[in-house]
């Protein structure tokens, strides 16, 4: 699924497809139909990811509201035994890491294409 943020292997594959589509092309290869289709596909996939985390780039009140929903969902999962860790223990560091390692790089990719 294009929005599966927790799957590291999927993220690695997706980043590899991005690199293959945008970083390894010569000008002659860029015009080839396969390359154009590859670029279109990977850009759409990244747009879906951006839509999934769009609350992070909107007004602070929107960000705070949707983050609270996520926190509650994660906390209830922990309380009911469906998650191993309490989100209270890592929330702040997790949000900073999420921005540093996911939201900002994704935004830069979409800006560059």
Image (spheres, helix red, strand yellow):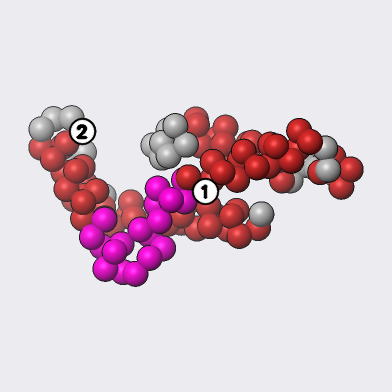
Give whichever of 87, 110 is nearer the camera.
110
From the viewer's perspective, tell me whether residue 74 is left or right of residue 80.
Answer: right
- Give the residue displayed 62% in from the left and 38% down from the top: 41
Going from the N terminus, do you reach mark 2 or mark 1 first? 1
| Residue 65 falls within the magenta-colored stretch | yes
Does dot 1 land on a helix, a strand or a loop?
helix
105 drawn magenta: no
What percent of the width, then of the height, locates residue 11? 51, 37
Q: Which residue is mark 1?
A: 47
* Residue drawn at (24%, 48%) of the image: 70
Rendered residue at 81%/43% (across/down): 30
Residue at the disc numbered 2: 83
Q: Nearer the viewer, residue 112 or 45?
A: 45
Nearer the observer, 106 or 79:
106
- Image quadrant for the N terminus? top left
Which residues are the magenta region? 49-66
Relative to 87, is 110 above or below? below
Q: Is residue 89 visible?
A: no
Q: Report whether 102 appears left or right of 87.
A: right
Residue 16 in view (yes/no): yes
Q: Main secondary structure of the magenta part?
A: helix
- Mark 2, secondary structure of its residue: loop
Could you say where residue 113 lies in the image, as x and y percent from the top left?
Answer: 66, 54
How far across and down, in percent of the image, does residue 95 sit?
Answer: 34, 55
Q: Quadrant of residue 36?
A: top right
């Amino acid at each position: 699924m294009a929005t599966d943020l927790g799957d590291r292997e999927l993220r690695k594959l997706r980043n590899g497809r991005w690199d293959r589509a945008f970083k390894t092309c010569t000008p002659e290869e860029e015009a080839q139909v396969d390359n154009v289709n590859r670029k279109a596909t990977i850009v759409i996939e990244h747009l879906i990811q951006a839509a999934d985390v769009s609350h992070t780039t909107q007004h602070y009140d929107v960000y705070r509201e949707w983050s609270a929903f996520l926190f509650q969902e994660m906390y209830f999962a922990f309380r009911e035994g469906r998650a191993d860790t309490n989100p209270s223990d890592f929330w702040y560091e997790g949000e900073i890491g999420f921005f540093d390692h996911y939201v900002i790089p994704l935004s830069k990719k979409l800006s560059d294409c």
